[in-house]
Amino acid sequence: MSIKLTSWNVNGIRAVNKKPEFWNWFNNSKADIINLQEIRANIDDIPADLYNIDGYNSYFTTAEKKGYSGVATYSKVKPVNVFHGLGDIELDMEGRLLRSDFEDFTLLNIYFPNSGTRGAKLDKKIKFCNTLTNYIIDLKDAGRSIVISGDVNIAHEPIDLKNPEKNHENSGFLPAERDWLSEFLDLGFIDTFRELHPTEEKYSWWSYRYHARSKGIGWRLDYFFVSEDLKDKVLSATIEDNVMGSDHCPVTLELDF
């Protein structure tokens, strides 16, 4: 049995709800599980069209601050359990993590913090990353197979952005961010896209400025990671850079159980 998962930072669920590109993608994705990040809406503000969708169970983690952060997961199969947040009161105020436990794996839908202009918020981001590491290792130690999806807000290696030489001091490519991601993967996790496409230069985010997308000036910030025990179950991992509607595009993962 194969299962298809998708993940997309939609940059506002209310805004994307009005875009035909989003609904064309959603209705034609053939995904079993759809993860959205940066929904930027509280529960009461989520459009009815996206609160209940035929054929999907829907779950949301939202920020206390209105119009900020938040994630959503839609699943054709009802999870065994759903959990919200990392268990850290300060970090969880921003609604960045939604966990869904299925029979064969635990899925984490995550919207990582941005480290701010020239790393002004780097300490806060690293705290989130380290807290997340401890949370995930506890799950792994408990015997769970793990799938992680979301906007990590980090381009890991020079191949993951158009102009690496110009961005070493910019958010998303800071040494501390990249080091954390390297250390996390070394704990026993696989970057599924890079595992299957080791030399492919493909991006999932483009600045709205300077016609960056049409010029191919992008960053790979959106990922699917899996724990090593799922490595041999990965059938495909893709970046749907032809899909419009946000400054990010969807990424996909297909697993065989």
Image: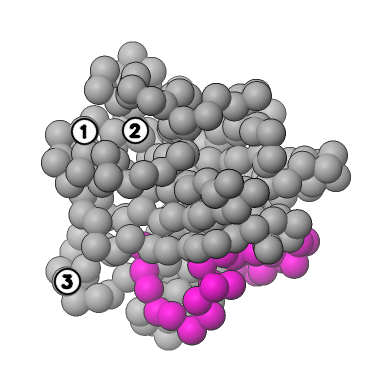
- Would you say 256 lies left or right of 33 here? right
Residue 177 in sight here: no
Residue 17's disc is 1
Q: Residue at x 44, y 55 (%)?
A: 252
Residue 139's disc is none
Q: Residue at x 24, y 56 (%)?
A: 243
- Would you say 67 lies left or right of 88 here? left
Could you tell me which secondary element the residue under label 3 belongs to? loop
CB atoms of marks 1 and 2 within 8 Å: no
Per the image, the residue denoted by label 2 is 40
Could you tell which of marks 3 and 2 lies nearer the N-terminus?
2
Q: Residue at x 64, y 33 (%)?
A: 102
Could you tell me which secondary element the residue under label 1 belongs to? loop
Foreground residue among 168 and 109: 109
Residue 33 in sight here: yes
- Would you say 165 lies left or right of 140 here? left
- Would you say 16 lies left or right of 74 here? left
Asked if the magenta segment contains residue 248, the reply would be no
Could you tell which of marks 1 and 2 lies nearer the N-terminus?
1
Q: Vertically, is 196 above or below 249?
A: below
Q: Which residues are magenta?
A: 177-205
Per the image, the residue denoted by label 3 is 214
Instruction: Give the number of the mark in front: 3 or 2.
Output: 3
Q: Residues within 10 Å of mark 2 (few under 14, many from 20)?
A: many
Could you tell me which secondary element the residue under label 2 belongs to? loop
Asked if the magenta segment contains residue 191, the reply would be yes
